[in-house]
Amino acid sequence: MEIKVEKNENNTLANLEIIFDDKESQKAYDMSCRKIGNSVNIPGFRRGKAPKHILEKHVGADYIKREAIESMLPKAFHKAIVDNNLDILVEPVVTDYKFEKGEPVSVKAEVELRPEVKIENYKDLTFETEKYTRKENDVQEELDNLVKKSAELKTATHETATTEDSVVIDFKGFIDGEPIEHGDGKDYLLDLANSAFIPGFAEAIVGHNLNEEFDINVKFPDDYHDEKIKGKDAVFNIKINEIKEKILPELNDEFAKKVSSFETLDELKADIEKYLKEYEEKENIRRKEKKIFDEVMKIGEVIVTDAMVERESRNILNEYATQFQGGTGIEFGKLLESKNPELMHNIKDEAKNRIKNTLIIAKIAQNENIQVTPQELQSKIEDLAYAYNTSLDVIYEEIRKNSNIIHGIGQQALMDKVSKFLAEKNTVNLV
C-alpha cells in the first residue's frame, strides 16, 4: 500500500491518494463477494453458493468493488493520519477511485484539517470596560416592585379607564371589513399599563368609559409573525365590561411576612441590600471576564473555512429546529432562507465566531495545559439538570441519544476554565 498526502496552502485540507497493490485489492474483492453472497438471495442457488460471475451479474461488479474499497479504507486512513501527523476535523471523504481487476486500486480522498491557530501575548494585558453601578434608591425600587406584584384587583370606583387600570373587555378585529382570524375575545382581562397586545391597542382604550362600545384604529407591526396581516391597518370594536383598579398593600412588617420569610420590613430591606450588593460585585466580575475573553479572541488568528461554517450553521439550525418547531435543521434553514435571509446571514456569522472561539480556546488550553477533570464535567451536567429543572437520569438519557451534547458540555467547561485563567493573567479597569 502506497499513500501520498498533499496539503493545501492554508493547511486546512489534505488530499490523499492511496494505492492498494493488486493482490491486496483482489483479496478484498473476493472477501466482499463472500460477504455479499451470504446476504442476498439468487434464484437457483443457496445463499453463498452462487458462482462469482453470477453474483457480479446479480448485484453488479461496481457494488462489489465499492464494498471492497470500504473494507480496505479504515486501515489505510488510519495509517495516513498517523504517519503524516494529520489533525483531522472530520472523517476523510472519498472523491474518486479506480478499480480494475488485475491492476493496483487507486483511491482519492480529502480530509479537513484543524486550522493552525496563531495567538501570542494573551497575558499581562490591560483593558477598560464600563462599570456596573447600582441605581440610587434601588432597595426602595425593589420594594415598590414587590408591592406592585402583590396588588389586588378590585372593581374600580371610577368609570373612566386610566393607564393604571385593568379592564375586562369584549373585542373583535377587522381588516378591510373582514373579521381577523383569532382576532376576537370575550371578557378578556387586559392590564393597560403592561399590555402584550399590538402597539397602540391598550393606549387607545384609556379615557373610555364603563359599558362604552367604541372602535379603535391600530396597525399591525411590519415584523408581525402572521404574514397575512403584518403591516396592515385594522379596526377593533371594543366594549368595556368592567374597570378594575390595583389596590396596593401597605409597606410594613405584615407585608414583609406575607412576601418573604422575614418577620420585619427592616429585615427584608437588609436582605435586598445584601442581594443587590452581591449582584453588583458579580456583575462587575462578569464584565471583566467577558472583556478579557472578547479581546483575547480578537488577538487570535485562525482561518475558518466555508465547509466549517456550513457544518456549524447546520448545528445551530438543528438547535433552533429542536427548540421551535421540530423537524431538521436543513428544513428549518430553508424556511429561514426564504423568510428572513438576514437572519440566515447572522447565523453564519455566529457559526464563524463559535468556530474561531472554540479553536482559540483549545489552543490556549493546550499551551497552558488546561484540562477539564471528570469532576468538573459532572458538575456541569448537574448544573444543566438544575437549569432545566429535571433529573440527572433525564440528562444522561439525552446524552446517550446524542453524543454532541456531552461534547458541548465539555467545551463549555473548558471555555469557563480558560476564561478564568485569562481573568487571572490580565487586568481590567472599570470605568
Image (tube, rainbow, N blue to C red):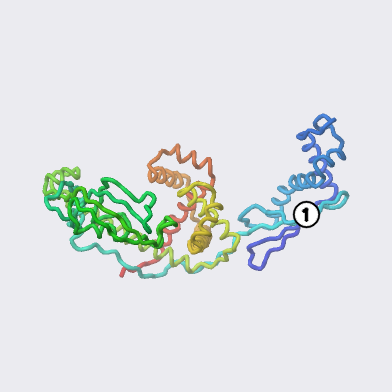
Residue type at the position of mark 1: Tyr
Query: Which residue is at the front of the view, 34 or 429?
Result: 34
Please provide percent x and percent y for residue 331.
Answer: 55, 52
Element type at mark 1: strand
Horizontally, residue 290 falls left or right of residue 186, namely right
Please provide percent x and percent y for residue 135.
Answer: 22, 63
Mark 1 crowdedness (10 Å alpha carbons): few <14, some 14-19, many ≥20? some
Can residue 11 be seen by looking at this rendering? yes
Can residue 353 be seen by looking at this rendering? no
In the rendered view, would you say 326 is above or below 234? above
Q: Residue at x 45, y 38 (%)?
A: 394
Query: Which residue is at the front of the view, 81 or 323?
Result: 323
Please provide percent x and percent y for residue 350.
Answer: 49, 61
Horizontally, residue 20 falls left or right of residue 82, namely right
Q: Residue at x 35, y 55 (%)?
A: 174
Residue ID for mark 1 = 97
Query: Outermost residue toward the front?
Result: 177
Q: Residue at x 86, y 39 (%)?
A: 52
Horizontally, residue 233 falls left or right of residue 310, namely left
